[in-house]
Image (cartoon, rainbow, N blue to C red):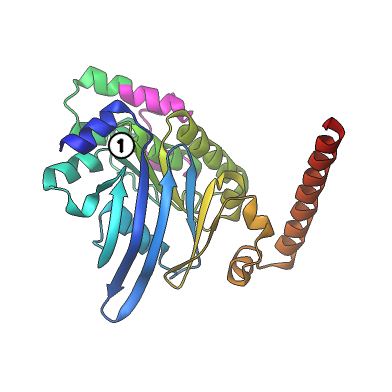
């Protein structure tokens, strides 16, 4: 347990690396040799159409599924070869934001957020309550402690889910479709919150999403999966210029989005030309 625990305590620049992950169910190959590095302080997005394998890949990364072959490295420590004790410690470093928020309807906001502390910490009640108040304030839900999930909006539920994911101060944050079911304005607020948390706490954040606003707003590092394979990898600037046919058909499916891409390409080209002109003038 020493290696991974000391790494966490030293606050080093943590990352997740997957190497040649393969996963099949019966005769169906769902993940076919995917490798990637997810860095701390960045929003790492996994995108792809329904059935492409992104959810299965994520479950392999967090240990819910065991890959048939390959490695899942948390800061160079292979999760697949950890002892039960090491794996338990690692999982306490992981925060999860579920697609439907997964709040307990019979619990208040405060009780929902405190749940991981009740399960995994040895803090006294007053300390736990103070920590809950800290994370609720972080997600702008300072006065929502005593409300029940049925009494708050979808966007607030997502923020409660984020608060619960953060309460144990995780090194790794996984977000499954964080904007599912939300209006565009609320989605942008959730994206902004995820980015702020990732940057402020130097978290290794992995977001599974279909939301193209998220791709363009917080896509520091993007992996596009098609039929179980990594089809493209880059960032939200590079995706505009991508010539990958499958990626473009997925991202810019409508004529409106294609026009938007063309406009962004012109804007980006204009900025590049301006920078070149400035460099020439300064020579």
Whether residue 97 is visible: no
What is the tally of numbered marks visible in this picture? Answer: 1
Residue farthest toward the left in the current orientation of the protein: 84
Of residues 198 and 237, the one nearer the viewer is: 237
Quarter of the rendering containing residue 111: top left
Report helix, strand or loop for mark 1. helix
Give the residue at x 52% y 41%. Answer: 190
Give the residue at x 44% y 38%. Answer: 159
Residue 131, position as x, y percentages in the image: 32, 23
Q: In what quadrant of the picture does the N terminus appear?
A: top left
Q: Does the magenta stretch include residue 45?
A: no
Residue 277, position as x, y percentages in the image: 85, 40
Residue 7, position as x, y percentages in the image: 27, 33
Of residues 79 and 264, the one nearer the viewer is: 79
For the record, the magenta segment spans 131-154
Left or right placement of residue 225 versus residue 234 in this view? left
Q: Mark 1 points at which residue?
A: 112
On screen, residue 193 above or below 133: below
Give the residue at x 35% y 29%. Answer: 146
Give the residue at x 66% y 66%. Answer: 243
Q: In what quadrant of the picture does the C terminus appear?
A: top right
């Amino acid at each position: 347990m020493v290696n991974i625990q000391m790494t966490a305590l030293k606050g080093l620049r943590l990352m997740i690396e997957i190497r040649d992950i393969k996963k099949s169910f019966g005769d169906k190959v769902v993940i076919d040799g995917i490798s990637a590095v997810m860095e701390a302080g960045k929003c790492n997005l996994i995108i792809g159409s329904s059935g492409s394998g992104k959810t299965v890949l994520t479950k392999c990364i967090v240990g819910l599924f065991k890959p048939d072959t390959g490695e899942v490295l948390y800061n160079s420590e292979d999760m697949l070869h950890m002892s039960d004790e090491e794996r338990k410690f690692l999982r306490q470093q992981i925060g999860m934001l579920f697609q439907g928020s997964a709040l307990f309807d019979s619990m208040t906001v405060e009780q929902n957020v405190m749940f991981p502390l009740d399960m995994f910490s040895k803090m006294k009640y007053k300390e736990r309550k103070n920590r809950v108040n800290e994370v609720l304030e972080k997600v702008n839900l300072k006065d929502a402690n005593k409300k029940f999930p049925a009494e708050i909006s979808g966007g607030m539920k997502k923020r409660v889910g984020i608060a619960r994911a953060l309460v144990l101060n995780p090194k790794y944050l996984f977000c499954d479709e964080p904007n599912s079911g939300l209006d565009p304005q609320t989605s942008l607020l959730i994206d902004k919150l995820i980015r702020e948390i990732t940057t402020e706490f130097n978290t290794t954040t992995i977001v599974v999403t279909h939301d193209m606003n998220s791709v363009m707003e917080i896509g520091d590092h993007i992996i596009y999966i098609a039929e179980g394979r990594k089809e493209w990898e880059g960032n939200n600037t590079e995706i505009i210029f991508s010539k990958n046919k499958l990626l473009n058909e997925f991202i810019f499916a409508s004529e409106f989005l294609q026009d938007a891409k063309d406009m962004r390409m012109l804007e980006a080209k204009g900025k590049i030309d301006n920078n070149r002109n400035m460099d020439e003038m300064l020579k």
